[in-house]
Amino acid sequence: MGRSRREFLQDSARAVCCLGLASCPWLGSAPLALAANENDERYVREAMYYNKLPGNRVECTLCPRECRVADVERGWCGVRENRAGKYYTLVFSRVCAAHIDPIEKKPLFHYLPGTRAFSIATAGCNIECKFCQNWEISQFRPEQVSAQYAPPEAIVRTARQYDCSTIAYTYSEPVIFYEYAYETSRVARQAGVGSVMITNGYIKKEPLLKICQVLDAIKVDFKAFTEHFYRDICRGELKPVLEALETLATLKIWLEIVVLIIPTLNDSEAEMRGLAQWIHRHLGADVPVHFTRFHPMYKIKNLPTTPVRTLERCREIAREAGLHYVYVGNVPGHEGENTYCPRCQRVVIRRIGYTIVENHLQNGHCRFCQQAIAGVWKT
Amino acid sequence: MTLDRRRFLQKFLAAASVLAGSRFPLPATAQRLTPVPNRGRVVAVKDARVFRGPEELAGEVVKEMLNRGLVKFTGQPDPVSAWASLFRAGERVGLKVNCIAGRGISTSVELTEAIVAGLMSAGVQPENIIIWDRTNRELARAGFRLNRNGRGVRCFGTDDELAGYENELAYAGQVGSCFSRLLTQFCDALINVPVLKDHDLAGVTAALKNYYGAIHNPNRYHDNHGDPFIADLNTSPLIRKKERLVVCDALRVQYHGGPSYKPQWLWNCHGLLIGQDPVAVDSIGYNWIEEARRQNGLPALAEEKREPTWLWTAARYGFGAADRRAIQLLEA
């Protein structure tokens, strides 16, 4: 890994400064504090989804892990704590990373292309991908990561100030900062700002349905199509993710999927074919799928970067399965970054990296053949 | 067919990379380790005089108990010789206490003071003694007086800006964690000073599990009742090379409802467990908890499906003994 955790956090904090947050009303004129590591009560809020059990124990009902947590202990995610039989999130308004990103970086290619997303995260995650690129925040507890107090209203105000169409809950795992993401999305909607969640989809149905009422789009990281990958590489489960995706397909919310292809672990043609067919059958042909390139990271440093040819083969397989919008990711300049019209096959949106260099959409239709292109487009 | 050196190396590296890529890319689970000194030897000290009242400890009795136990354990003629047989002047010694449950059931300040006195009798400078746990707040709540860089014995948590966690992961079997710099950089030797408690998930928490407070991600390692994670963590050379002594605080024992403080299931056991083998200390502690549960009409931990199986895993790794027949339990 090129950068240490400390360097990463310093960069993140600088980025917050660069965004001007240090001069926002909610920060006052105080210099940016990097050592805000106490469990300040401002960050503590009763969790929305849990059951009380005898003996001051609780059962979390937010994610499929369903942690049973004794008094003074925390759930698997490390950001929820049992205090005398009540369960609390410790990361409400506790932002450890904030950046303005192009929406394409999420990646969301069919949702307001060319717009900006005010992207925020708190510490913590409910799985542990051994290839996590943000492990310095996702695999740490809140008090171990420098953070800023940023209540929902301040986030929405900052997003508008910097002309961001959307707030993105990303980098770590929004499921674990559910209450904060939900409340921020609710406030954002009232202010005319959109909200998108970049998630692993490891969430139970009831909270998923509720937060979707205030979200505009979701990108799900579909880690692989085998239980053993989820169990051994991510310490999670595939089945609940499939169920969450099926739930999302029934809702009026824009959905895109990313599959990070890791050499030898999830790159077999058979697995990709099965995954593509499942998406086609259960989610539909219009759900965009991004096959992205792995780089050695966190606990998997002994495998090479994904060959571009492998990503291209995944794309071919997915298109053969009938999916309309299939992309190659993390390979800037590749033709697989472009959006092609499923009817005339011409390039509708041409991209280099996160930059749009051509846009031939007209009111959500291909300019060349008038085919409707699925997505959420600017009107 | 003959191969020149370059081609041979190319083929060898290609084969190696295929093998590496085809396997799960994590370090193998810990194999058998070198046994700790005095493997299986544990001294139990009990003294009914140790409580002045329902909750107040008699510090001088705690100190007497500790020194009596250490003399018995080391075979030295007196406490000063006993301490000096384990610690040298000039060493930096860390005392890993356990404060998660607040004042009700944390490592007692009186025991910690007795250990500090023992170390100083061996010539260890007070400034070279660090009492530590995860956070300053937990230490303060348990009654410890924080001293970050003043004169005298130092006391602060990993969350203090003086400390923090290492940037890089260290692996021990299935555990991959960033360790507290207090453990890795601030001390040459460790005294593990846990408190004996029932644990909702792990069954028992004492010496081995105390090091969950030395890593950044303990919540990742409670699956399967902590087995093999608790054992794996303790195979880390970062711990094994520095842990010099275990003094388990069993003056009060939380025999049910742990790890938090539940006064209705608290037992004034008046005990200390002393040794260099954390597996053996935990094994005896487990027996004590089971005995208290039995006497209070509670089911055995195995009946509640939370038997501390990580003990047997730790024993299999070879550095300590969990089987009662392999443990020499002495009384002092």
Image (cartoon, coloured by chain):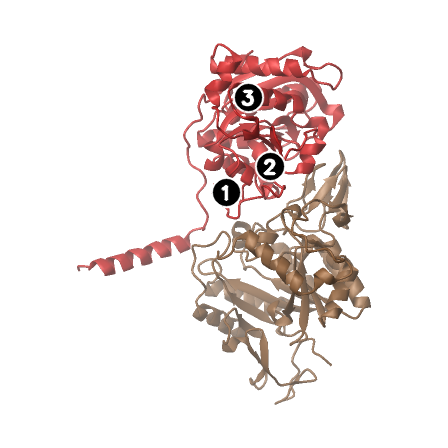
Chain colours: A brown, B red
Q: Is residue B17 above or below residue B210?
A: below
Query: Looking at the image, is mark 2 or mark 3 earlier in the sequence?
Result: 3
Query: Looking at the image, is mark 3 or mark 1 earlier in the sequence?
Result: 3
Tag 1 subunit: B
Label drawn at residue B183: none
Label drawn at residue B213: 2
| Mark 1–mark 2 CB contact (< 8 Å) | no
Marks 3 & 1 on one chain: yes
Expressed as whole percent of the image width and height from the top left, the position of residue A303 reads: 43, 57
Q: CA distance from mark 1 to mark 2?
A: 17 Å
Q: Which residue is mark 1?
A: B174
Q: Residue at x 24, y 61 (%)?
A: B7
Q: Residue at x 54, y 24 (%)?
A: B246
Marks 2 & 3 on one chain: yes
Q: Which residue is mark 3?
A: B120
In which quadrant will I find the C terminus of chain B?
top right
User: Looking at the image, is mark 1 or mark 2 nearer the viewer?
Assistant: 2
Q: Residue furthest front?
A: B151
| Mark 3–mark 1 CB contact (< 8 Å) | no
